[in-house]
Amino acid sequence: MAEFVRLDSSTSRHTMDKSITLPPDEIFRNLENAKRFAIDIGGSLTKLAYYSTVQHKVAKVRSFDKATKEAASDKLYEISVQEEVTARLHFIKFENAYIETCLDFIKDHLVNTETKVIKATGGGAHKFKELIERKLGLKVDKEDEMTCLIKGCNFVLRNIPHEAFVYAKHADSEFRFQTTQPDIFPYLLVNIGSGVSIVKVESEDKFERIGGSSIGGGTFWGLGALLTKTKRFDELLQLASKGQHTSVDMLVKDIYGGSYGSLGLTGDLIASSFGKSATADKEFSKEDMAKSLLHMISNDIGQLACLYAKLHNLSRVYFGGFFIRGHPVTMHTITYSINFFTKGEVQALFLRHEGYLGAIGAFLKGAEEDNPNQYSWGENYAGSSGLMSVSPDMNPMQRARSGTFDMLEMDRLERQLVNLPLLQDPSSYIPDTMDLTEDALAREYWLYCFEEALDGVVKRAVASQPDMPEAAERAEKFRQKYRHKLQTLRHQPFAYGSLTVRSLLDTREHCLNEFNFPDPYSKIKQNENDIALKYYQKAVKSLEELSWEERQFALVRGVLAGNVFDWGAKAVSDVLESDPEFGFEQAKRQLEERPWLVDSYDQWLERLRGPPHKCALFFVDNSGVDIILGVIPFVRELLSRGTEVVLASNSGPALNDVTNGELQILTERIAAMDPVIQAGLREDRLTLVQSGSSSPCLDLSRLDKVLAQVVRERQTDLVIIEGMGRAIHTNYYAMLSCESLKMAVIKNSWLADRLGGKLFSVVFKYEVPAGKPSQGSAAVTPS
Amino acid sequence: NKSKSFPWFGMDIGGTLVKLVYFEPVDITAEEEQEEVENLKSIRRYLTSNVAYGKTGVRDVHLELRNLTMCGRTGNLHFIRFPTQAMPRFIQMGHDKNFSSLHTTLCATGGGAYKFENDFRTMADLELLKLDELDCLIRGLLYVDRVGFNGHPECYYFQNPSDTQSCVKKPCTLEDPFPMLLVNIGSGVSILAVYSENNYKRVTGTSLGGGTFLGLCCLLTGCETFEEALEMASKGDSTNVDKLVKDIYGGDYERFGLQGSAVASSFGHMMSKEKRDSISKEDLARATLVTITNNIGSIARMCAVNEKIERVVFVGNFLRINTVSTKLLAYAMDFWSKGQLRALFLEHEGYFGAVGALMELLKTTEDP
């Protein structure tokens, strides 16, 4: 009593128009370097997967050779743009009607491949086997459908943040995205195809079909077609969404005249599905019958899923299969059923990329020699369509315009990403402070804000590549792409998981990369670093002249004032652009006077009177004044106290944030002028690590594995997070298992308003985890 | 210590059917006969001399329990059923026969006891004693099992359920009946875990029951009665309607140990227009029956495993004249549990609630 394969395609083919409405090279991207293929052919949709390499520009910095330095320029390092090849997975979903056209296109554009086979899965795989082999000249190699599904499911759960969501029809935000769990196992996957398979997944390779049911999507479709004379699955769902099941179903109140009090069964409960249709003298509407059928099947599946979840003691239950795929109606009825049967103990979870699981799994089966599971992957927002991009009930306009193609792109990340070992509870950690999916006002503001800033970004992108005449054209393409993403997000804020300031920033970075603007701020950063370095010694000297207590305050003010220098914030970039002389001292004057908006400086100072920390992990923010005149002197003081320091900076560029490459050069230069820094580096008490991120924000659950290792080895007992992106937009509420310090200046008046402050308000948040008295307070407590 | 005054009725008013049990005393003394009021006599004669009442009432003669001793009286217990839709006519008859003048309480269970309470009062001047349906079900079931079926066991099971050739019905007794999982299939389905006569819990239920079978059959085939639907089902072949594992995989699905003959998708073939256009009503009726039955079997089995109960007792009028379902349930329990679970059935399928209601009457306080 089971089901694993999707449907016979014959039923859904008739109305398809065979022309592709988008230029196919915008769909089958990077096909010329495609290396390995997999295909999942379902009842109505085909999902194609391929691995390809993307050549794109990356900005690199390199120290000038000391001997030639004077001659070259007065810059302290050289910026070069290099070509880099990275790996990307492409997944494309389209209606089966396009298969032939698509295969032809692929054949014509496949140049470099040495591939001989194509992995295939899905019920339609055998049907199109001959066609695929003939068109592509590849041998079709069939893979077990359920194995592919599970492999794909594990992959997305592990690699895509906000992959899983809870569906709540009547809530402010229909989609409630779940945070990635450190351990995704065990879970239950309920795959509702034409029948139902219930699979318990215990580890990457261990899973078992523990049950199933023959009453599934095929029953809804087949029985529904018989009852209503409606042929298409989508139309049946449409009918169901308009119907009233109470005219067909026998309810408890139809039998009792009210509720069945002693059992607590409410009167509205269905006692017998179709119980009222056992009569010859009544006609029932198509809508009502379809609705009754939908309830019957959803309730039945929900009930079985709950019984299996209970028996195997599992609380994570994911639903997939064509019955669910992109259909709010079925997600709603399944959710309702699960809530009813488990009284809220189990939540029905759905997956954003559910439709791709088979194709992803089939691909992974074929790519085992490349060990794809050894890497971390990230969703490329620039090349992915997002949730419900082609759902007719959600977005009819979009469907008409983009044809029926849906895409997912996953970039292989150079670094493997893991949790920060110092998170108090990794399973409940949410990086983002504000969920714009749920907060309509905030969403409105930030979408507007990013749209407003677009001109400036385009301008800077062009300016960053003065030697390239086509830069303007590319920048224009970037503008269109990002503007389109913003429009999509306005209508479907849930498209890429929870909408956050971070995701808006990341999407912009992805789009910039897409059009080969790897680092629009490289020259600005270089310039700022140059200027700031000139003041370094003077700044350090004036700090040393202060008393200990004055110095501690000056150091904090220095970090805060340095943080005002931020091209990412509009209020600041306006000032910077109009007045390049805007200096450090001026910035200090802009700062709010104490008491700050959030002010635990006194506790921090008290703590500093105690014994030094063992090791501090410092997540840095901007280039220039921020890092050189703000952060480094602060670090210098920590080193002098005997605290080891790990400086974590971005692996790749984002806005004017200092990258690991740049920071390497900067610290070398500072070490040459400053014996304290030099000793720190030499004695390995000052270490530079990369965060693994290329975002202006910070996700502590996706950090470089090496960083995590260093943090553990050095017994880090203090985490410092600096800047609006890392300490306010993200991690403001992050709970750590050691002491933490979050420092930022609010450079956005709307946000300041939200937090009850004003422009240039200061957040200085020093926290000691509950139940763990800081070493300092322990030291001052008389014994 | 005079026994309860006649007539003795127990009634169970379900969503689809009303089940009525009537105790006909056969030890009436001449003196009693003299005293017996005319309308009581006429009720007795009417019920015992007919096997059908009106257009839709039926007495299941083959189920009659003869020479039963209840409350010190000897008599025959009659089992009568009629559609719940006929309830207004039944109440009208109670009025016409001046039932309210008789010294008796009408004990009723099932949802209809609540739904029709007011109609009984206003139309026939009758006050119902409403009883909980699950209490009555369990009490009635245990009673009938105890007294047996005219010298034979009330209970039976199927030997060799996995083999259609050698599968045979075997009588048995419910000695030491607890714990049992009781699956009552009426219009809907209730599943109870029963630990003793007074200690039970409703584990779950499903709305896919007998009412669903009949309701869908009526819509799909245009039939009108349960008998008609079953008759069609008995002639049909569900594999023309359902998609089997082998229809998808060409054979067994070995990766998951599924036989090719297992149903992968109920009504799965009906997704194709060609197949819809050529399907027979009999095949549709059969598929509906098999789908509903398998689903009940599947839920019952999961409940049995969750509750750690090995004995699963199926009752309810869905099983009346329905060997397709009883055998299928027996097979499903045996096969999917690898012989761990046993399905048991009872001859008086749907009447236990009514019997339980009658017993409540005999238990109630002495006549005023």
Image (spheres, coloured by chain):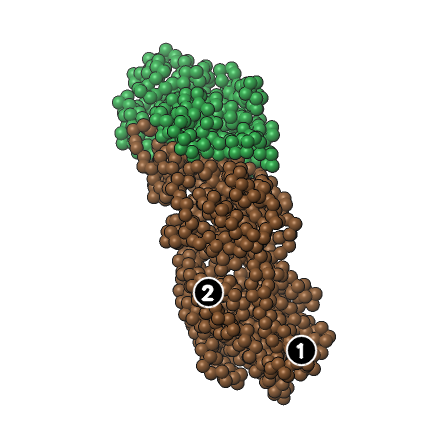
- The residue closer to the viewer here, A744 or B27, is A744
| Residue behind mark 2 | A478
The residue at the point 45 percent across, 56 percent down is: A495
**Where residue B3 appears, x then y in whole percent?**
41, 21
- Colour of chain B as rendered: green
**Where residue A616 appears, x then y in whole percent?**
64, 71
**Where residue B200 appears, x then y in whole percent?**
51, 35
Name the subunit of mark 1.
A
* Label annotation for residue A65: 1
Would residue A727 be visible to someone looking at this image? no
The residue at the point 40 percent across, 33 percent down is: B273
**Where residue B346 appears, x then y in whole percent?**
49, 23
Which amino acid type corresponds to the residue marked 2 in the rendered image?
Phe
The tag earlier along the polypeptide, 1 or 2, is: 1
- Colour of chain A as rendered: brown
Residue at the right extreme, as displayed:
A683
- The residue closer to the viewer here, B77 or B224, is B224
Q: On the rendered image, what quadrant is the C terminus of chain A found in?
A: bottom right
Is B236 placed above or below A141 here? above
The residue at the point 56 percent across, 52 percent down is: A111
Is A178 placed above or below A654 here? above
- The residue closer to the viewer here, B105 or A333, is A333
Q: Is mark 2 on a helix, strand or loop?
A: helix
Q: Is mark 1 on a helix, strand or loop?
A: loop
The residue at the point 39 percent across, 58 percent down is: A491
